[in-house]
Image (cartoon, grey):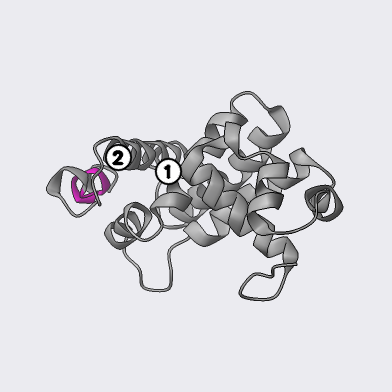
Amino acid sequence: MEKSANGSTRDLLLDTGITLIGTVGSRQASARAVEDASGVPHGSVRHHFGGQSGFLAALVEHVFSADRAAEGESTQEVIVRWLGTDRVRTRARYELMLLATRDEDLRHVIVGHRERYVDGLVYGGLTRTEARQLVAALDGLVLDALLRNSDGTDSDHDPTTLLRAFR
């Protein structure tokens, strides 16, 4: 049985799930496909997550935890990371968000994580409405960069102008 870098089969399944969803999409990233790609026995997703819905909720937690800005990391640096070294994870995040538009439970999990970003912006001085609009606008900027195959370093995807609009 394979293990992830930290030795956990659970984390290996999550990392593999993110990679599959971010490369081949959610339709091809079934529990069995994730188990096969991870080199773990069939039934491991059910054992560790209780089934597909628990696995998807854990994937959301896994993605959003890694998406947060590191200490001292600017919004520009986060976007460049999302579109560069974390590009597959970013595509997986948007795949999961699309799934959540049709899955009530998953939607609540994702909205909860997005509200953490909003809360941070409200703490920084924006109104809740402004903070939600800024999160949505940044999503649009990142999605556009993904569609245009940008790495986020071009001026079209620099969030500075967008961020200024909310000050």
Q: Residue furthest bottom?
A: 6
Residue 140: % across, % down:
34, 35
| Relative horizontal placement of residue 16, taking residue 69 as reference (left or right) | right
Task: Name the main secondary structure of what is drawn in magenta.
Answer: helix
Q: Is residue 107 visible?
A: yes
| Amino acid under disc 1 | Ala
Which residue appears at 48% of the width and 57% of the height? 67
Residue 127: % across, % down:
43, 43
> Is label 2 in contact with label 1 (beta carbons under 8 Å)?
no
| Relative horizontal placement of residue 10, taking residue 145 as reference (left or right) | right
In which quarter of the view is residue 84 placed?
A: bottom left
Instruction: Give the vertical position of 3 relative to 90 (above or below).
Output: below
Graded by Cα atoms within 10 Å as few (under 14), some (14 to 19) or many (20 or more), the crowding at tag 2 reads some
Give the position of the N terminus as an image quadrant.
Answer: bottom right
Magenta segment boundaries in residue numbering: 158-163
Which of 128/157 is in front? 157
Which mark is drawn over residue 148? none
Q: Is residue 92 visible?
A: no
* Mark 1: secondary structure: helix
Graded by Cα atoms within 10 Å as few (under 14), some (14 to 19) or many (20 or more), the crowding at tag 1 reads many
The residue that label 2 is drawn on is: 141
The residue that label 1 is drawn on is: 131
Which of 86/120 is in front? 86
| Relative horizontal placement of residue 102, taking residue 155 as reference (left or right) | right
Instruction: Give the vertical position of 12 relative to 7 (above or below).
Output: above
Instruction: Give the vertical position of 33 relative to 69 (above or below).
Output: above
- CA gap between label 2 and label 1 equals 15 Å
* Mark 2: secondary structure: helix
Which of 148/42 is in front? 42
Which of 33/158 is in front? 33
Look at discs 2 and 1 and give the one toward the viewer: 2
| Residue 161 belongs to the span the image colors magenta | yes
